Image: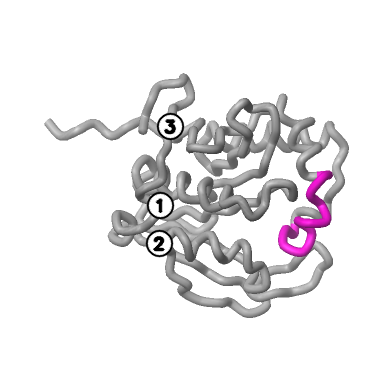
Amino acid sequence: MGEAKMPGPAYGLRTPRLLIRCWHPRDAEMLKTAIDQSLEHLRPWMPWTSEEPEELQAKIDRLRSWRAMFDLGKDLVYGLFTPDENKVVGSSGLHTRVGQGAREIGYWIHADHINQGLATEAAGALTRIAFELDDVVRVEIHCDPRNVRSATVPRKLGFTHEATLRDRTIDAAGERHDTMIWTLFRHEYVESRAHDITLRAWDVVGRRIL
């Protein structure tokens, strides 16, 4: 008999410096604090900041929606926390919007925690999850060419800059900007830095799965 496929998705992961897990509505206050403290840093790059700052109840409702989508396997949005789980340092996700057999990784980091390699650590961990648990053939990262910090992440992890699409994204101010597409395929994964990211992962009931 062949080896049984490990159950997924991963509801939580631990890397050397992060707890990465599915959002819960009880995280709303920590998430709101992190976004409010980082708005100036995030606005040039994150279109969703046009809706910020939101009231706490809006955050609760949003996290309920994210959790529902996660449980249904339709979209996987993760919170990035300090190891003691007392502070939100960002968010990431394995998004299904790039088609069957593929995932897009998005990320943002709290303004107080940039330039520490946390986005690379989180994106690398989720790349491992995508290939080893979700069994995809391709992982993508999209970013604005002007966002040098963001573009450093896929480059460090071994992704290839496949294309730059012109005027493809509308920012929080309503302006159009180019979008870089970075791609890593399954056959490239083993040789990538993402393959070497140290992590532990567990499923919805806490069983170790990676």
Q: Which numbered disc, 1 or 2, marks the residue closer to the eye?
A: 1
SS class, disc 2: strand
Note whether 129 is above or below 145 in the view shown. above
The residue positioned farthest toward the left in the image shown: 1
Q: Earlier in the sequence, mark 3 or mark 1?
A: 1
Residue at 40% in and 52% down: 194
Amino acid on which the number 3 mark rests in the picture? Ala
Residue at 44% in and 58% down: 157
Quarter holding the N terminus is top left
SS class, disc 1: helix
User: Foreground residue, 17 or 47?
Assistant: 17
> Could you say which disc has been placed on residue 19 in the image?
none
Say if the magenta span includes residue 193: no
Q: Earlier in the sequence, mark 3 or mark 2?
A: 2
Binning the other alpha carbons within 10 Å of mark 1 as few (below 14), some (14 to 19) or many (20 upward) gives many
Question: What residue would you read off at disc 1?
Answer: 194
Describe residue 185's horizontal placement relative to residue 123 as left or right: left
> Mark 3 near mark 2, Cβ–Cβ under 8 Å?
no
Amino acid on which the number 2 mark rests in the picture? Leu
Say if the magenta span includes residue 42: yes
Binning the other alpha carbons within 10 Å of mark 2 as few (below 14), some (14 to 19) or many (20 upward) gives many
Describe residue 12's horizontal placement relative to residue 30 as left or right: left
Q: Earlier in the sequence, mark 1 or mark 2?
A: 2
> Could you say which disc has been placed on residue 184 in the image?
2
Give the residues in magenta: 36-47
